[in-house]
Each structure stands twice: as structure tokens, then as C-alpha cells.
Amino acid sequence: MPDKLGIDAVLNVKLDGVSGVSAWAELVNIKDLEQGLTKDIIDNTTRANNGWKSKIGTLKEGDLTFTMPWSPSDPLFIGIRNAWTSGAAVGFQIFDGETNAAGLIADFGIGDFKWTQNSGGIQEASVTAFITFVDTAPAWQDPS
């Protein structure tokens, strides 16, 4: 299998959440997306472990960070900003490509919506989102 390039990855958004009635729309103007997936880890060591510490993973957690141009006329930009303002969840599909793609599908809350105005570049919004549960549990899609 050939290596997957970051430029070929896809971030789709559904502004009314995964189970909403609107269509998925691709966020084409983002850059440097990072998805973090972790688990809480608990100690389950017993004397039977022969001196070895033992741990198990429990609850999963996920976040998503990306930057996009500050574009108050873009409906998807407005929708993400409004989700931060209102606390509403948005659906994201984070895929490794357009066809035969793998990735996470989940509802996210918008935790950070930072406005950067660097003198040497364009104005940008840095977005941090976290998995939340609304009507549909997060799911991983494998390639078909």
C-alpha cells in the first residue's frame, strides 16, 4: 500500500451534527490538521503479575485541531464559529483520502476558536474540537 499524503486527506463537516439532515461538505481551505486519539489508562496490577505492573485502557477520547483562513463570508467558517458561540455540536468526518478512505466519524464540540492576525501572513482561525455525544456514537470507518 502506498504512503498516504497529508494533502490527500479529507475533512468533511456537517454543521447540524452527524445525524443531522444537512449534507456533508468538505472543508477544503484548512491546513495542518491533527487528530488525537487517546484512552484513559488504569492500573490493574495484582500479585499474580510476578512483579510486573499491569495496565488496561478504558475510556477513549479524541480531539481535532486545524487552522483555516479567517473568512467571515464563508458559510462553513460561519457555521464552525457559531458552533463555538452556541455550544452546538458539529459532525466531522476525518478521512485519509477521498476514495476507499479510513477515518473517524463523530460529533465534536468546538473548544477553541482562536483568531490570529500575524503581520507576515493572512488572518487565520485556529480551531480545536473535542468528541462529544449527541445522537450517534463515534465510529471508525475502515476502507471498503
Image: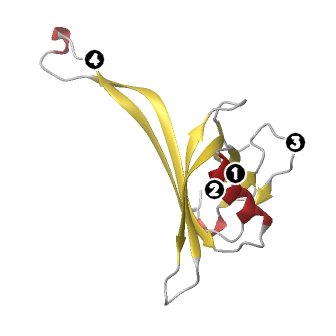
Image x and y of residue 100, in percent? 73, 51
In the picture of the structure, the residue carrying the numbered disc 2 is 96
Closer to the eye: label 4 or 1: 4
In the picture of the structure, the residue carrying the numbered disc 3 is 21
Asked whether the beta carbons under mark 1 and mark 2 sit within 8 Å of each other, the answer is yes
Mark 4 is surrounded, within 10 Å at the Cα level, by few (under 14), some (14 to 19) or many (20 or more) other residues, namely: few
The quarter of the image holding the C terminus is top right
Q: CA distance from mark 2 to mark 3?
A: 24 Å
Amino acid type indicated by mark 1:
Ala
Residue nearest the observer in this picture, 131 or 119: 119
Q: CA distance from mark 1 to mark 3?
A: 23 Å
Q: Which mark is residue 101?
A: 1
Mark 1 is surrounded, within 10 Å at the Cα level, by few (under 14), some (14 to 19) or many (20 or more) other residues, namely: some
Q: Which mark is residue 44?
A: 4
Closer to the eye: label 3 or 4: 3
Closer to the eye: label 4 or 2: 4
- Please identify the quarter of the rendering in which residue 54 is found: top left
| Lower sequence index among marks 4 and 1 | 4
